Amino acid sequence: MTGAATHWHAPRSLREALDLREDYGDETVVVAGGTFLGVLINNGVLAPEAMLSLRDVPELRRIEIGRELTLGAMVTHREVENHPEVRRLWPALAHMFSLVASPRIRNRATVGGVLADADYASDPPSMLAALGARVVLEGPRGRRELPVEDFILGLYETAIGSDELLTSVVVPGGHEAAVYRKFRTRSHEDRPCVSVAAARHSGRLRVVVGAAAMQPQFFPDVCGMGASPREIADEYAGRIDALSDARGSAEYRRRVVAVEVRRAIEETHHG
Amino acid sequence: MADPRSGGSLRYSQDVAVEGMWHARIVRSPYAHARVVSIDGSALPENTVLLTPDDVADLSMYGCQIRDEAVLSRGEARFVGDPVAVVAAPTRRLADAALALVEVDYEELPAVFGIEDAVADGAVLVHERHHVSENDAAYFGIRPVDGSNVCHRFRIRHGDVEAGFAQADVVVEETFTTDGAAHVPMEPHATLARWTDDGRLEVWSGTQTPFNVRMDLAAIFGVDQSRVRVVCPPMGGSFGAKTFVRLEGLAAATARKAGRPIKMVLDRAEEWQTLNRHPSRITVRLGAKADGTLVAKTVTCHADTGAYADCGPGVAQKMGFAAPGPYRIPNVHVDSHCVYTNAPPNGAYRGYGQMQSIWASERTMDIMADRLGIDPLELRLKNLLREGDAYATGEVMHDVAFEECLRNAAEAIGWNEGREGKGLCVLMKGMQTPSRASVAVDALEDGTYRVRCATVEMGQGARYAIRTMAAELLGVGVDDVSFPDPDTDVSPYDTRTTSSRSTHMMSRALVEAVRNLREDGRTGVGEVADQGGLDPDTGQGIASSHWHQGAAGAVVEVDEETGSMKVRHVHASVYAGKVVVRAAAELQNEGSIIMGLGTSLFESIDFADGQVMNANLSDYNVPSITDLPRITHDLVEREGAPVHGLGETALPPIPAAIGNALQSFGIRPRSLPMTPERILDAIDERDAQAGTRELEAAE
């Protein structure tokens, strides 16, 4: 980073963290694992004067397992990936986290951080949305929950208020099937060109496409129309306003969506 | 004894420190072509030094092959990232902070990007004139085309191609391209410069070319070469990136103004603005008789060298003279061009232009094999150069091993058990010619020996290999032979550590050095010089005093709905003659193969109006361990054979072997890297052609 001194807030409890957040708001950048912020700061894109680190907040590190799975915001990708009960009961979720970047990154990157970044090319949002997960936000007005697909508003844009913190994610259990397909065009450690998460719960299908557009793409009406996997896939490919980047052009992404959505739905039938 | 690299005790070039040194950062142009109107350092705190074009107006132009570079570009930036000023401060952190305080006003000028636009009529000229350098790296007849962006054109004229094509039953013509790529050494460029009290310039630099750097620094500052000293600590990788003058002129000029030593270490992102690999466009026309006998070939190469020639003319030359391939072809014309654009400079990269022309030529061989209905291995075996054959340059081939390498590669991938998804490539690759290597061996008072040698260590294990060879000749253990950092004040002259030449050249020079040591008792110097060179207008002469020979095979699977390719297995076979240090030789093969996979699959610099859009290791991917297929390789040795260089041989054949494996499915990739999107386009093209053929058959 470029010389400027940074004030570093390191609260040791959730109460303290929420108070600091309320006091400082967006003037202070919240840092979780730092894998994304670190890149921005090193590249000079961001030079925050103050940061609020959630590293030492024990309440945010919990994994609670019941009918639903609660992942504290500071739980790392690696912890989800390796948790025996998560692997048994939410295998697709654990598998998805195991596909992110490299172990070095997964040891640092957090569940809350990746959602709050709302980067279009991250793996977890589409899988969490397909599983029907809810983001828990806490602030001076109390606690509220939002479905992941409503939480992410656009590229790097979320529903977090300037006095709120993302404290956990709640993932429903009891899916009949859940699948995550990560389609890469470059290194195995790269982000996806297109990702498709599909899950069935109580006979209802949810298909969410990640990395193809500026935010996760979910069309409940298409999923609910009882059509064949191919028809649903073609409809997704037609509706998604795909983007172009170094991982693939918009036109290429639409073709991949048509293939990968079909395959993901087919897998939910067989898996 | 723990390896100092794994134990963390090795001092790399970026670790060099001297008392009183300051740290410097480069102010870089945000425009691809602009005139610097003004530079304002008034916001800089005390205790900073700002180097501007006014401070270097007395310095001379330089360039290893074309004299087209000036320290700070004399106020005209020619690429995004071109240094326009330097700021120095007591610490790196202060220098970083100072960098943000320098205000520069620019007047943007028209720029030119890409080979096609650069060679078009009326193109913006990146340089008005092309002055051939006096550096000894300008070792061949450089033929700039004044009034154009072509800073060198090279030709091979062998036989009569018109008559040759007239005899052909089948002629194929295809155009191939390769994207720019980055070297990505783990250690970035690092240089420290200081002026001694008696006015000598001393430079510690991570460079593969100490004597060329000394020559150019002497030219820049107008002093005798003896007034410049270049020391080369070990580098954390280079792959060609750290060749010729990079930071040395800037550091020395800043040190002169600051009156104190100046250290420069680049940020990772700056690496993409410093030196990259040449993008290329290559058109191959190949004619054969129905029985597979090759009768004529023309190759037209264009290499995009960016805003400064650097060693681009040499790269275009090698791209050209490797283009005929290891085949007997009676009629060959090659036209290779080195072209300026307003991109960051492109220069040496492991394989030096030859990967690009081998990709084009060896892909064409499989397209020809398909057209003829001949097995690609058979087509190659039928035409391969054998002992005593003359190459297209007229030179006679000796110590030939193409067939053995090619058969090894074919066998390793199970060529005879069905060739679906399998591809082969065979190559010849030149070594720096002419070149000279000298080495000194001293007997020390404690009974051990010291090698003084300008071969630099960049992770390839050259020092250990040279110590091993010296120890063998001296009849002592390797630990009794030391090899201090190359230093132009004490190491005898060597052309440079490039083109897989060091172990080969030094193995010969050491024999003489040790013989002379035995006579003298204290010191022995040995020197070898390989003569040669080509007529730039006919390409006749000696292209390479020593040819690197190898082959590769690849096995792939393709998801035809998405174009996603899985490489299952890659094998490379490399002619070693005699292996000196087996573990190091094997690592060279493996490293070359892995770099070749990156080039094949996804390495690509993404430009937008001359700006590198992916100058970081998240957006620019290099292969990780999880990307590797099954990798196997072999080193071909022969009784009594000399030591052959092998630091790069396994890289150039990998892309074509993979491309040819796709060809076995009728998919014809023509651009590198072979991304899934490009493969899907090639699948569409195949299916469209099949549709057209069916329609024609129905009519």
Image (cartoon, helix red, strand yellow):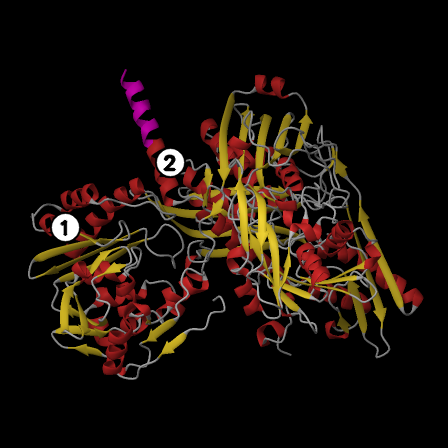
Q: What x and y, as percent, mark residue B45?
A: 57, 66
Looking at the image, residue B447 lies above or below residue A181: below
Q: Residue furthest bottom?
A: A12
Q: Is residue B139 visible?
A: yes
Q: Is residue B526 left or right of residue B87?
A: right
Q: Which residue was labeled with disc 2?
A: B682
Q: Is residue B23 left or right of residue A225?
A: right
Local SS, label 2: helix
Q: What x and y, as percent, mark residue B171?
A: 51, 23
Specify start and end residues of the magenta stretch as a single range.
Answer: B687-699
Q: Is residue A63 left or right of residue B462?
A: left
Residue count near mark 1 (Cα–Cα under 10 Å), binned few <14, some 14–19, many ≥20? some
Please state, as top left, top right, bottom left or bottom right, where the C terminus of chain B lies in the image.
top left
Please give the name of the residue rendered at 38% of the width and 69% of the height, measured from the top-left corner. A103
Seen from the viewer's position, the closer of residues B268 and B504 is: B268
Please give the name of the residue rendered at 73% of the width and 57% of the height, measured from the top-left corner. B210
Seen from the viewer's position, the closer of residues A93 and B292 is: A93
**Callouts 2 and 1 in the same chain:** no
What is the chain letter for disc 1? A
Q: What x and y, as percent, mark residue B164?
A: 61, 20
Identify the disc placed on residue B667.
Answer: none
Label 2 amino acid?
Ala
Task: Verify whether residue B698 appears in magenta.
Answer: yes
Callout 2 touching callout 1 (CB < 8 Å): no
The answer to which quarter of the image holds residue B397 is top right
Label 1 amino acid?
Phe
Please give the name of the residue rendered at 40% of the width and 55% of the height, measured from the top-left corner. A187
Q: Which residue was labeled with disc 1?
A: A219
Please state, as top left, top right, bottom left or bottom right, where the N terminus of chain B lies in the image.
bottom right
Local SS, label 1: loop
